[in-house]
Amino acid sequence: MLAVLNEVQQEVTPLLGQGTVAQYIPELAKVDPNQFAMAVTLTNGESFGVGSFEKPFSIQSISKVFSYTLALRYYQDDLFKRVWREPSGDPFNSLVQLEYEDGIPRNPFINAGAIVVCDSLISHFADPKKALHDIMIFIRECCDDHSIAVNHTVAESEMQCGFRNLALANLMKGFGNIDNDIDQVLQTYFQQCSADMNVSQLSRSMLYLANDGVDPISGKTFISEAQAKRINSIMLTCGHYDASGDFAFRVGLPGKSGVGGGIVAIVPGEMSIAVYSPALNNNGNSLVGTKALELFTSKTGISIF
Ligand code: DON
């Protein structure tokens, strides 16, 4: 496994420098674009890493997998009344479909959907602080590492410039699909996105999705088998926004990206893979990270197809 990861790293190194780090979040715009890290954690607990695999970065939209897992656990099928499970074919921060689809986001991985999920978690606890706490406790439990924390500088930076998210939340509130105070919902959402993790922690944390909802190392059940199947399906069809088809075509695995430059991919029954390289393609997904995953699945023949 380490040999394949080394080979992948060698082949993507010349591509570093292509793409651009996220510009709309000032703290992320400062990040060195020429970084690369990749880690694999097998369901038997073995793990492998190359590059800066211990260096934390902002997980951003990858956090939406954790918050959606919790919301599905609390609301089950009722959640689908407020957020669908169809690809949007639009950018992650787009407003257009919401207007003619009555404020119901297409899926939980575009920003609008994740904001609704966040709202649902706040309602569940009737306290935004408890909702964020619950998300963070869950992330820490998933990767069995209690050091994971929110980077408040990044959260604050996005709070200052998150104009499109403010517009999305207001539009949905106008349609009656946000129940709580908009500032509280967005603050919680920005904070969950601003958790810092490294690729080793990320690949470890998503093993429950490679093992029917049960963490194969601790034996803890996080979600039902049926719900794990659904989350993986939505990751495959919606995890990369308007590039989800391209990601599925090239990589052949369910995956979720973040504008911090991370991507997590799931190989059901076998492993979870995380990659980091902060420069993004035009769809807001890690350019080198996508290439690394494509090389990994091509070289190993590992994919769901
Ligand atoms: O709301 C935002 O725009 C960011 N906090 C998260 C977006 C994101 O990560 C998109 N992913 N590639």
Image: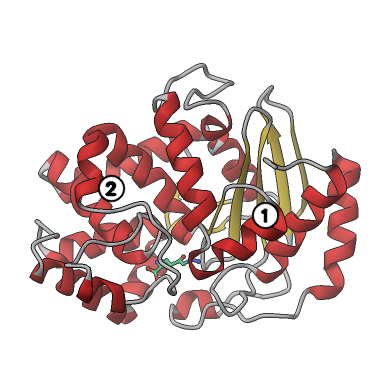
State the image coordinates of residue 186 (x, y, percent, origin top left). 24, 64
Q: Residues within 10 Å of mark 2 (few under 14, many from 20)?
A: many
Residue topped by disc 2: 132
State the image coordinates of residue 151 (x, y, percent, origin top left). 42, 59
**Image-quadrant location for residue 137:** top left
Residue topped by disc 1: 275
Q: Which amino acid is tagged 2?
A: Leu
State the image coordinates of residue 32 (x, y, percent, origin top left). 66, 75
Front residue of 131 and 67 = 67
Foreground mark, 2 or 1, reads: 1
Question: 108 left or right of 81?
Answer: right
> Is residue 282 placed above or below 270 in the rendered structure?
below
Q: Is mark 1 within 8 Å of ligand 1?
A: no
Q: Residues within 10 Å of mark 1 (few under 14, many from 20)?
A: many
The residue lying at 20 percent from left, 40 percent from top is 78
Q: Earlier in the sequence, mark 2 or mark 1?
A: 2
